[in-house]
Amino acid sequence: MKLPAQFSGLDEAAGLPAKPLHLAIGMFDGVHLGHRAVIGAAVQSARATGGIAAVLTFHPHPGTLFHPRKPTRLIMDPTAKAVLLQSLGVEVVINQAFTPEFAGIEAGRFLPLLKKALPGLVEIYVGEDWRFGAKRRGDMPMLVSEAKALGVSVFSAPPVSLDGEPVSSTRIRTLLEAGDVEGANALLGEPYRAQGIVAAGKGMGRTIGFPTLNLAWSPELRPRFGVYAVKVSGGFPGVANYGVRPTVETTAEPLLEVHVLGPCGLGPGDEVTVEWLKFLRPEVKFPGPDELRAQIAKDVDEASMWFGG
């Protein structure tokens, strides 16, 4: 049986094959180095036992439910997260809606419900500070005790640190909002990405000598508006502007426009991935098109030098 990539909730996951299920549980927003320690353990054990490596994750972020006036903005959407998880060897992704009803499940009922929904469950993988159940009353000792009673083992991974501080999604969000993609990429373990379909633009970039790929991309967490050195699908180096284009025509929603440094063959309708590599400068309003053109030429030169061109 070929396993589906994703299930919408535990109820849908009832049809999994009767193989040992190794389940990593967490929000895993960004799938950073700390998350990978948990997920990698599940994948490794599943491969060693002929089992299934699975992830149980949630949407929206629990913080959005508990603090609706200050919702937690996601680093990546569920689809992008599922694609990345599969690249790490995860065979099944269960996207559980984090509703008031789900959040209200008492800690003592959580594991029995999980085992009932996933009868093949043999091991749970979490970060050692993971909490579960209503009001986060379930802790690691409770998890181990409850799991043992159900014949389920527990693996807990300690926090991963970099530069003397724990790697966390919160830390990555702060770096992205500041434009520090190099710092964020170090914590993510790979480049921050934007994925979407190239949309037809008005050709204004072409008129000033810098044609762009305009990406239909609207993340919850918006990186700092500005100009970045990037790579586009296929490894093509480029310069991207993310923002509201104040010099040309201020847009209601930010746009991602990429000028590729050389021919690439991509155009409207193509699905592309943009890897953000270095922040070059903030987005600013110039007096007119001539000043904008001159600055873009400088941005292109700077990016080319950074790429070693």
Image: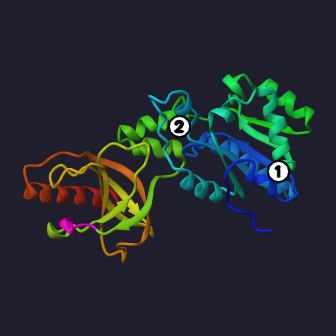
Q: Nearer the viewer, mark 2 or mark 1?
A: 1
For the C terminus, the quadrant is bottom left
In the rendered image, which residue does mark 1 sit on? 21
Q: Residue at x 71, y 30 (%)?
A: 128
Mark 2 or mark 1, which has the lower sequence index?
1
Residue 140, compared with residue 195, is above or below; it is above
Q: Residue 180 location in percent, x, y?
A: 38, 41
Q: Nearer the viewer, residue 162 or 289?
A: 289
Q: Nearer the viewer, residue 210 or 117?
A: 117
Disc 2 marks a residue whose amino acid type is Ser
Give me the C-alpha separation between circle 2 and circle 1.
26 Å
Task: Magenta stretch: give its range.
Answer: 201-205
Residue 135, compared with residue 208, is above or below; it is above
Pointer 2 local density, CA inside 10 Å: few below 14, some 14–19, many at least 20: many
Q: Residue at x 18, y 49 (%)?
A: 246
Q: Residue 295 location in percent, x, y?
A: 16, 54
Query: On the picture, is 291 further left or further right than 10?
Result: left
**Residue 226 belongs to the span the image colors magenta:** no
Q: Residue at x 30, y 67 (%)?
A: 261
Q: Quadrant of residue 79?
A: bottom right
Residue 85, compared with residue 128, is above or below; it is below
Q: Residue 11 location in percent, x, y?
A: 75, 49
Query: On the picture, is 69 further left or further right than 56?
Result: left
In the rendered image, which residue does mark 2 sit on? 169
So how many labels did they put on this image?
A: 2
Query: On the picture, is 145 further left or further right than 225?
Result: right
- Per the picture, the main secondary structure of the magenta-coloured stretch is loop
Disc 1 marks a residue whose amino acid type is Leu
Q: SS class of the residue under badge 1?
A: strand
